[in-house]
Amino acid sequence: MTDHILSVRDLKKHFVIGHEGTVNRKPITVKAVDGISFNLHAGETFGLVGESGSGKSTVAYITVGMYQPTEGAIYFRDQDLFADSKGRPLALKKEIQIVFQDPGSSLNPRRSIKQILELPLRIHQPDKDRLTEVLRLLEMVDLPPDYMHKYPQSLSGGEKQIVAIARALATDPSLVILDEPTSALDVSVQGKVINLLIRLQREFNLTFLFITHDLSLMRNVASRVAIMYLGKICEVAEAAEFFQNPQHPYTQMLLSSIPVVSEEEEAAKPEKIISTGEIPSPVNIPQGCSFHTRCPYAMDICKRVDPVMVETGAGHVARCHLFEQPEENLTQVLEAEPGPIPQSP
């Protein structure tokens, strides 16, 4: 028995999106998630961060059962989520819920808020009085009782997302996956939603898998942070350590690009690494380290061999050849002037 509420082990999800050629018909495959592993501890907020196309949302959809993994496994409290070929038991489904990015498309416009909140209660809490539970959920998220009679189109974007959060909590889950929960909202209401999530987490001891592209947000809400790039995790660390001592060149590039408003914040950022080039297509991922086409520290081995995770400190791991080198070689590489960005082989 472990203290992990969720364990992801060597998870892969590959999509065949077509075929090339007219004879052999070689499949064209997108490696959306390509062998990642991480753990979630009960009560923490684990931030999964990456650019669009990095595979972070695919991880969420696999975890809630929308996709089947190509390879690997996910364990919830040591129970394999995909062990039963007939589907996931209701007892497991109620424990893991998700809040989607766009509440406008995740809420049925033809149903009232009462009907939206009643649906998970019908499935997972059939013995409870649904009206009482709907009123409890609305009070929990600071919405007036009369909102149960409204429809999604009469609510603001922030109110829609708050209803989506209430719906996710209707089953009394242990783990809530937040897939970019504030990115579709105005800046003025993002703080309100984040404060609500923090309060709910404390009150109900919830565990959050928080998926976002916003590193600034992770600084304030995450316990630990993982960075994804082209279907793989580059670096994982405690949030404070992550922002103070980023190890992977890609992480340093992202952190150095965060906009700041004060000299103190600018001084806390890592040395500027210029973001050169675009993220490669997940259909044609570069050989070796997938980041080597954009990395200023790329070595010959980076073009040929995919690096493995290396522990760089307590609870801090990074997937980079820089940390597999002898210490004297590593010092020479890091102190050298960054060379030109190598081209894809």
Image (cartoon, rainbow, N blue to C red):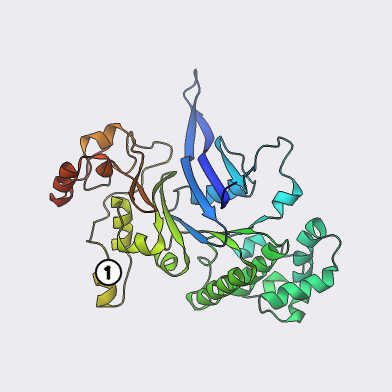
Report the residue at 40% width, 42% height from top: 281
Q: Position of residue 23 (x, y in %)?
A: 50, 17
**One can see residue 293 in this view:** no
The reply, left or right, for residue 305 in relation to residue 70 is left
Q: Viewer-proximal residue, 25 or 167?
A: 167
Where residue 207 sits, quadrant-wise, is: bottom right
Q: Position of residue 101 (x, y in %)?
A: 56, 61
The reply, left or right, for residue 147 in relation to residue 262 is right
Q: Say what secondary structure mark 1 lies in.
A: helix
**One can see residue 329 in this view:** yes
Q: How many marks?
A: 1
Report the residue at 53% width, 45% height from top: 8
Q: Is residue 136 above or below residue 302?
A: below
The reply, left or right, for residue 218 in relation to residue 173 is left
Where residue 241 sits, quadrant-wise, is: bottom left
Q: Viewer-proximal residue, 179 or 73?
A: 73
Q: Position of residue 51 (x, y in %)?
A: 41, 54
Q: Is residue 319 above or below residue 159?
A: above
Q: Is residue 251 above or below residue 11?
A: below
Among all residues in the image, which is located at the extreme top?
Answer: 23
Q: Which quadrant holds the C terminus?
A: top left
- Type of amino acid under label 1: Ala
Report the residue at 66% width, 75% height from top: 141
Q: Which residue is mark 1?
A: 268
Among all residues in the image, which is located at the extreme front?
Answer: 1
The reply, left or right, for residue 317 in relation to residue 17 is left
Q: Residues within 10 Å of mark 1 (few under 14, many from 20)?
A: some
Q: Position of residue 5 (x, y in %)?
A: 59, 53
